[in-house]
Image (spheres, helix red, strand yellow):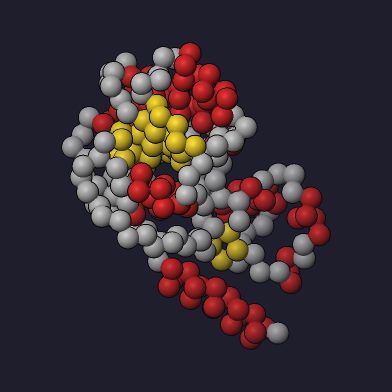
Amino acid sequence: MGQDVNQGNRVMRFIDYSKTCIVTLCRFHDETFFANYGQQADAIIPMPIKDHKYQITNERTIDILFVGSFIAVKQPLQFVEIIAKLKNNYPTINAVMVGEGNLLEEVKTEISKLQLDNNIRLLGQVSQDVVFDTMTKAKILLHTSKFEGQCLVYAEALSQGMNVVSYPVGWFDSSEKHITGKSVEELTERVQQLLSQSLRFQEEKVINTDHIVEAYLQLYKGGENNA
């Protein structure tokens, strides 16, 4: 379901793969599993997202949005760094960060140090409804995480009409609406390219819950047939 496919998972040595059905969440997740443990999943099935009914609008007052825990793997300080770079060309850039974690104080210090107090607003930990409402007001989700098993926030942002920029981790399908980069410089460039365009904020549903349920049912049926 996430970082359990990374190196150092001691549970893996006890698994009898001939008697176990393994599911990963996306191609990236499966490739990481194979690279670290020499095994591939029996099926790749993503997690579904909750269907939220919010009005999709082109009136977007937030330029860049961060949603995630303020922890090392999510690299929130990189988000701050990128906003500082973007401010050179967009002095009034408006960014919002949603979340909390052990790097919160470092994030606050960096925002102050880079003179971004008027450019980055910290919302803290809020309800999922508030997150989705904020997404309807934002143009671009900038996700700086260095690892994701799937990353539901991609699909959530796309479902609210947002554009997504991220590292090539978790579930992603490079497209006009979701573009990736491999460094801070590339992420900055990708965001700047989007900000210079006339963006469209149409809803994009990329995960079908019915298909997910059916995929798991097929696995159970297969197991029954092999019993």
Quadrant where the N terminus is found in the figure: bottom right
Judge whether residue 154 can be spotted in this image: no
Left or right relative to 175: residue 76: right
For the C terminus, give its image quadrant: bottom right
Q: Hey, which quadrant is residue 83 in on the image?
A: top left
**Left/right of residue 73 with respect to residue 171 in the rendered view:** right
Name above or below for residue 177 compared with residue 193: below
Of 61 and 9, nearer the camera is: 61
Q: Which residue is painted at 45% across and 25% down in the image?
A: 80
x 51%, y 56%: residue = 26
Question: Residue 28 in the image: x percent, y percent?
Answer: 53, 50
Q: Residue at (58%, 75%) from the top-left corner?
A: 219
Q: Is residue 173 left or right of residue 30?
A: left
Q: Nearer the viewer, residue 1 or 95?
A: 95
Q: Position of residue 39 (x, y in %)?
A: 67, 57
Nearest the eye: 99 or 218 = 99
In this rendering, does residue 197 appear at all? yes
Residue 202, placed above or below residue 87: below
Residue 209 position (above or below residue 31): below
Q: Relative to the observer, which residue lies in front, 135 or 32?
A: 135
Q: How many marks?
A: 0
The image quarter in which residue 42 lies: bottom right
Q: Is residue 121 left or right of residue 148?
A: left
What percent of the width, then of the height, locates residue 66? 43, 37
In the image, farthest residue toward the right:
14
User: Percent from the top left, x then y, of residue 79?
Assistant: 45, 29
